Image (tube, rainbow, N blue to C red):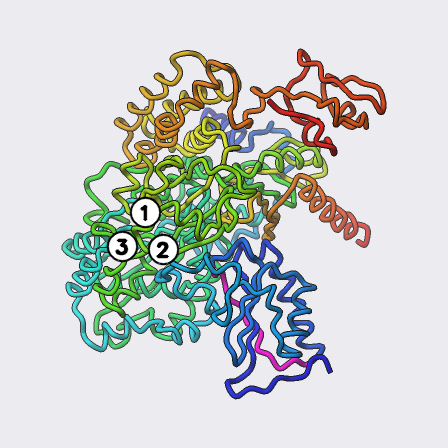
Amino acid sequence: MIFEIKYSTMGKTKVIVGLGSCGLAAGAGKVFEVIKKVKEEKGLDIELKKTSCIGMCYREPLVEVVDDDGSYIYGDINEAKAVQILEEHIGKSSPIKEYVVKTDLFETKDKNFFDGQVKIALRNCGYIDPESIEEYESRDGYKSIKKIAAEKIQPVDVIQNILDSGIRGRGGGGFPTGLKWKFAFNNKADVKYIICNADEGDPGAFMDRSVLEGDPHSVLEGMMIGAYAIQACEGWIYCRAEYPLAIKRLNIAIDQARARGYLGKNILGMEGFNFDIHIKEGAGAFVCGEETALMASIEGERGMPRKRPPFPAESGLWKSPTNINNVETFANIPWIILNGASEYAKYGTAKSKGTKVFALTGKIKNGGLVEVPMGITIREVVFKMGGGIIGDKKFKAVQMGGPSGGCIPEYLADTIVDYDSVNATGAIMGSGGMVVMDETTCMVDMARFFLDFTKKESCGKCTFCRIGTQRMLEILTRITGGDGKEGDIEMLVELSNQIKDSSLCGLGQTAPNPVLTTIKYFRDEYEAHIRDKKCPAKNCKPLLKYEIITETCTGCMLCKKVCPVSAISGEKKLPHLIDQSMCTKCGMCYSKCKFNAISIS
Amino acid sequence: MKQYYICEKYFFMRIARTSEKECVIQQSEVDLNLMDPFIEKYKNVRGNMIPLLQHTQELYGYIPREAFKKLESETSLKLSDMYGVASFYAQFRLKPVGRIIIKVCHGTACHVQNATAITEALEEELGVKDGETTADNVFTLESVACLGCCSLAPVMMIGENTYGKLTGKHAKEVIRDIREIETGSKCSH
């Protein structure tokens, strides 16, 4: 009897599979199916459940087993390993220690990833089934709004509470949330709106997706509290269409909240508090992350920003007073109301309170989602939680704030994470994308990549943004293509300053940041491209020289065959040669060679 | 009146980005009655333009010119406004696409992990360039900004499935597997 049923006094053993977008991409769906199949075939007395992202994306798929002794999270699970866990852990009550990545029972090699994290916004992500309102309620869900109803806390006091907590907008701007609410509250009108900005357009950021997929009710509760505070009657969640799973789970959550009376008329017995939430699917425009553009998009127009003032708090959606906050901000709100402003303000620095979620990606060992108290250093995040650079290569820089942000070089890695310290480097806190780069990442190419993005996403309203980014992209493409000229750097700086000064919205005002910061910290790389026609990171193909290492070449003729311009010559079993005058630097020979016999310089 | 007609014709030719002759062929393939339920639902809703266009695209894979015309006659929306919106947002397509859309992520994390190699490998496998559709109308290859699966970079999305930690070789295998299923199911019909 391998699959002997385990009796317990605490109820059934739970097996929980992480089914967030990243888990699914890593194969968690198949793992879930195989566990379900074995459970049915063998009649296992286990409770099989789903959850979402716990943040450990680099170990996906993750399977958690909770038995009488405690919780064991297994990482890097495939179908075979899942069956093995069922046999050993469930069947014989002997956990497979070497697969465990997180448990309180013994030390694992991934201990550092969780040490030092403080989970407030992500408090439920990876712990509850996001499609079950009961599980959210069992972890203090909807207690904050009930507290407001039971203790008859007035809107002004809710706002004061948020002000006291010191929380600032987590979408990147860093404007105090309480102040925003106060403005919206002070504008009296019959109809007011509250909007959740879930148009997470920054390439390289997925914090909001994880919150929406993992804990949609916390966002709804945050919006309800916000609606009560500013006295809004209708809420909108503007979510990117690229996040189908987030939209699906939000819809489920909204239906459940309506059925329980959390949304509707006279909510929780609060006379006159009527509130409902709708989802608006974005249609793919980065500029819609800007609040006036976002509102135009909800109204069904082209998502183009307009001049402020009037600010949304005065005249927003359909000309009514409107308040817009980001997903992560809303997810924090219920926790603050329940635990108190001072409890929240305990974390962080003088001017940046609380915690911040970061999406750690790029050339990092432990890519994933971390929530850390403000004030921690970037180095700590990269090396402690992130585990350092893949292949232990040299850490070069970290990019923060996406296309609006900048690159912070290695020697400034002791900068602490708070709005003002990060701004001082020329980057911005942004929504929380942290892309780590090593010595093989070319900073000029990075700047070109971001300009290519902002050029495409510029709505075209302001000339400086529309044409300026185009011109900057042309210069950067020329430099990475080996045709850089003296004076290019100065021209880039001049264009940058003009675009920053003359654009209406945040997109244009910040678009040159990636270029300005890379020029500031990595000017030598630009100069190497322009003057020496060399790419120090060996990244820009047109600047590379491909050569065959005669000692290693076996003469297999593969490179000769794949070369599209027939620049490679040589006899079978004899070292080949690349004719440099013909070579188009496509890199085909390099990627096809099985013997590492092609060098790049 | 006649002049108006010419303008309109020219306008539609731009929408379809194809010659008038081709448009006529497409026209016969589209069943416009399928749009009725959601037109009814959104007809008098504020801010209905984007949802109407999104539902239309969901039906046909793109927004056919006849659909624009139907929307104009049955709702209060204006053609010029609809074209303005449809051409503004990246999501909307004005020409037909393949049955299966391959979205290769070119977000920051994927870019750093060499997403270009994935696109190149797929271009080679499918014999089309980025943004194009294969001759048999099965695959359309696209680049997108970010799919939010950055820790599994480089990533691509086909239908609702996301594939992570790709190499050019692996991406090609995925396509071959899908093609096999596609042609297999065709034979059984």
The residue shown at (53%, 38%) is A393
Instruction: Name the residue beneath numbered marker 2.
Output: A372
**Image location of residue A57, percent across then percent down:** 52, 55
Report which quarter residue A279 is drawn in. Answer: bottom left
Circle 2 Cα neighbour tier, 10 Å, few/some/many (<14 / 14–19 / ≥20): many
Asked if the residue at tag 1 contacts the one at tag 2, i.e. Cβ–Cβ closer than 8 Å, the answer is yes
Rounded to the nearest angstrom, the CA distance separating label 2 from label 3 is 9 Å
Chain under disc 3: A
Instruction: Name the residue beneath numbered marker 1.
Output: A417
**Left or right position of A477 against A6:** left
Type of the residue with mark 2? Val
Rounded to the nearest angstrom, the CA distance separating label 1 from label 3 is 9 Å
Q: Which of marks 1 and 3 is nearer the N terminus?
A: 3
Is A52 located above or below residue A142 in the figure? above
Report which quarter residue B176 is drawn in. Answer: top right
Type of the residue with mark 1? Val
Q: Can residue B11 be seen in this view?
A: yes
Numbered range of the magenta stretch:
A43-54
Q: Which of marks 2 and 3 is nearer the N terminus?
A: 3
Residues flagged by tags 2 and 1 on a common chain: yes
**Image location of residue A72, percent across then percent down:** 54, 70
Residue at disc 2, secondary structure: strand
**Image location of residue A174, percent across then percent down:** 27, 47
Instruction: Name the residue beneath numbered marker 3.
Output: A348
Magenta-colored stretch includes residue A389: no
Magenta-colored stretch includes residue A44: yes
